Amino acid sequence: MKEKEVEHLIQDTKWCPIDQTFRILGKKFTIHILRNMLLLKQKRFNEFMDDIEGINTKILSIRLKEMEENGLITRKSFNETPPRVEYVVTTKGKSVEPILEQMAAYSIFHYPQVVFKDKKSRTFEEFMGRKTKRLK
Amino acid sequence: MKEKEVEHLIQDTKWCPIDQTFRILGKKFTIHILRNMLLLKQKRFNEFMDDIEGINTKILSIRLKEMEENGLITRKSFNETPPRVEYVVTTKGKSVEPILEQMAAYSIFHYPQVVFKDKKSRTFEEFMGRKTKRLK
DNA sequence: CGGAATCCTGAGAGATACTG
DNA sequence: CAGTATCTCTCAGGATTCCG
């Protein structure tokens, strides 16, 4: 890509692809919800409530709605008693996984003292036995 | 990696590598500053001020300080008049680039209507003529 | 030029209580 | 179970001014 194009993409905030992704994923707890759906296969409101530290029903409810509006997830409501609702990740939501993996790889390598009890730095590949996924 | 290990890594927020990366990079404008340093080779306070839409001196100042504390950048002050200060990306800071590229790839593919005038979806590889960088 | 110091505001976080 | 509905309240962030 020519330099001019890079500059165009970056300098105008509303066109910048990095900025756009940050608008979609940058709010508190959004990536945590996605992480739990993608990596722990969780689907339900109270599963998120139980496993995402510090979240509350209001914020979770708001985030799930935003994520639905942004096409990251869909909401499936079953007519049962007690009521059951499941959140399913869309293709667009699944595509976030490479970003999450790069984020994980980053801390695994650069912040081992936070992530590991033995405080030893590793690569993602060393730790997971495979390379990170990435978008083409 | 065994499932148990994944669960351990994720469920305890303070040990989760994704969460840790979010703590380092998740605040507003941090990735924009890094983006401008890495991709536009910018180094100076007023360059960031000019090219990051919506930022102000207070927030920029705070973010630069946080980024220095987190080891993403170093601050070089020259004894000159007029005073000159340059911010240089560290190795740890440069390692953020794969995350930024995945974020860019995501919007280039999934939000072309926001990113491109012709609104046509592309892969990062199609657009940039190379694959995304990634952490091992 | 590269900030620091103030003051000010509102969005959003958090707690609690309640409901279909 | 899966949420609303309020209410409070903090603090991130905006505007402005000043300083070495």
Image (cartoon, coloured by chain):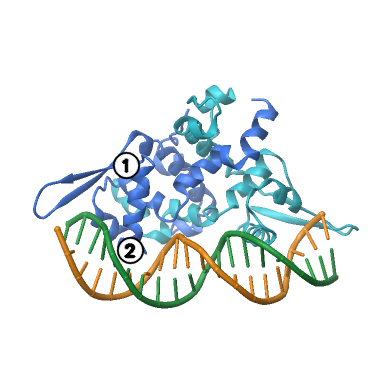
Chain colours: A cyan, B blue, C green, D orange
* Mark 1 and mark 2 on one chain: yes
Q: Residues within 10 Å of mark 1 (few under 14, many from 20)?
A: many
Q: Which residue is drawn at the image coordinates 66% and 43% (left, top)?
A: A36
Q: Residues within 10 Å of mark 2 (few under 14, many from 20)?
A: few
Q: Farthest residue toward the right?
A: A81
Q: Is residue A64 left or right of residue A25?
A: right
Look at label 1 and name its amino acid: Ile
Measure the alpha-carbon separation of dots 1 and 2. 19 Å
Residue B66 in percent (x, y) is at 37, 48
Q: Chain of mark 2?
A: B
Is residue A1 in view from this perspective? no
Front-lying residue, A53 or C4: C4
Element on which disc 1 rests? strand
Residue A113 in percent (x, y) is at 49, 31
Q: Is residue A129 above or below residue B111?
A: above
Front-lying residue, A19 or A51: A51
Q: Which residue is drawn at the image coordinates 57% and 41% (left, top)?
A: B14
Residue A86 in percent (x, y) is at 77, 52
Residue A114 in percent (x, y) is at 51, 35
Q: Is residue A10 above or below residue B19?
A: below
Front-lying residue, C4 or C12: C4
Is residue B27 in view from this perspective? yes
Please report whichever mark, 1 or 2, sits nearer to the chain's N-terminal start. 2
Element on which disc 2 rests? loop
Q: Is residue A53 left or right of residue A112?
A: right
Residue A55, which numbered label? none
Look at label 2 and name its amino acid: Asn
Q: Is residue A68 above or below residue A115?
A: below
- Residue bearing the label numbered 1: B73
- Residue bearing the label numbered 2: B56
Residue A68 placement: quadrant: bottom right
